[in-house]
Amino acid sequence: MITPPIDAEPRPERRWWHWLPALLAALPFIALAVVLGGGMRGVATWYLAQLALPFIGLAALVATLYHAFRRDRWGSGPVRATLAASLFLCLLIVWSFGLLPIPYPAALARTAPAATVGLPSDLPMTVAWGGNSVESNYHAVTPDQRWAYDLVMAPYFSGSETLTDYGCYGTPVLAPADGFVTLAVNDQPDEMPGKSSNNIDNPGGNEVGIRLDETGTYLLIAHMRPGSVRVEAGDRVSEGQPIGECGNSGNTSEPHIHIHHQRQDPADFPIGFAEGLPLYFRDHNGPAMPVGGLGEVDGTPVARGDEVVHQGQ
């Protein structure tokens, strides 16, 4: 048997160790390119990337550490590069768990069609969440709700467990535009306010989906009071027509009107899995896309969003 000399040079790294770091580093950018391409493929990739990229990074990190210990390759350039790329992917776990809110990468100016509609109530409202940024609109991280609104009425943010302590509860919800009802849910119970219900089974609660005559796209209006929805799938609605009452059903923390605009029919695509589209309001006293945002004063949550009220007929 021939024994190699003790001072023999280590075998060169296998070829795949040289391209693995570049592949790992490229994965997030490949996923981003698919998301920017739009469509349901982009929506699916957005969710898949949040789950898969940290897992791939962890698997690559474990494999690289095993290789480095077993072969004593700590000084190898490819090993060090692979460790760095793996750690980068592992750090994306903060995105996966919502610790780093990242808005769905759809550009407002390039996303079409937009819809401009009336407000879903004739009463004065405050925008709790709304707008284009994640700071003013926490919905922005979700593809279908990229430009969603949560609208409240004073008094709000009281923390009360009594529904009637909230100004929005029981007030009429109006059709914001002419259209055709494709979805109507009316049998979901109200949740106790003052805390998040975490209702993932029926997040929209009592809701109405409307296909807009003007664009052929869809509005979803959610969280209405049980038994209050006045329309059924197949009905036509006119702008300003009462369709229900504000409630606290679904995934919610207090009575409010949730509204967003999407490309796909909400009767066929569950909440969270559709392409969100820009939504603007007309015939009111504020900007076309009013913004929301929350703050705190002495530990008490306060709304920093725009106040809007319908004007005209």
Image (cartoon, rainbow, N blue to C red):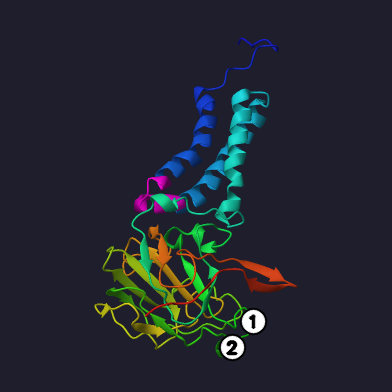
Q: Give SS at disc 1.
A: loop
Residue 238 shows up from this direction: yes
In the displayed structure, would residue 281 be above or below residue 43? Answer: below
Label 2 sits on residue: 165
Q: Give SS at disc 2.
A: helix
Residue 64 shows up from this direction: no
Q: Is residue 41 found inside the magenta-colored segment of the image?
A: yes
Quarter of the rendering occupied by the C terminus: bottom left
Label 1 sits on residue: 158
- x and y percentages locating residue 109 in the rendered image: 42, 51
Which quadrant of the view contains residue 311? Answer: bottom left
In the displayed structure, would residue 283 be above or below residue 245? Answer: above
Specify start and end residues of the magenta stretch as a single range: 35-46
| Mark 1 surroundings: few (<14), some (14-19) or many (≥20) residues within 10 A | some
- x and y percentages locating residue 235 in the rendered image: 25, 79
The kind of residue on which mark 1 rests is Ser
Quarter of the rendering occupied by the N terminus: top right
Front residue (pair 11, 81): 81
Residue plotted at (55% across, 46% down): 54
Looking at the image, residue 297 sits to the left or right of residue 45; the answer is right
The reply to whether the C-beta atoms of the residues labelled 1 and 2 are less than 8 Å apart is: yes
Return the residue found at the far right: 298
Looking at the image, residue 56 sits to the left or right of residue 278; the answer is right
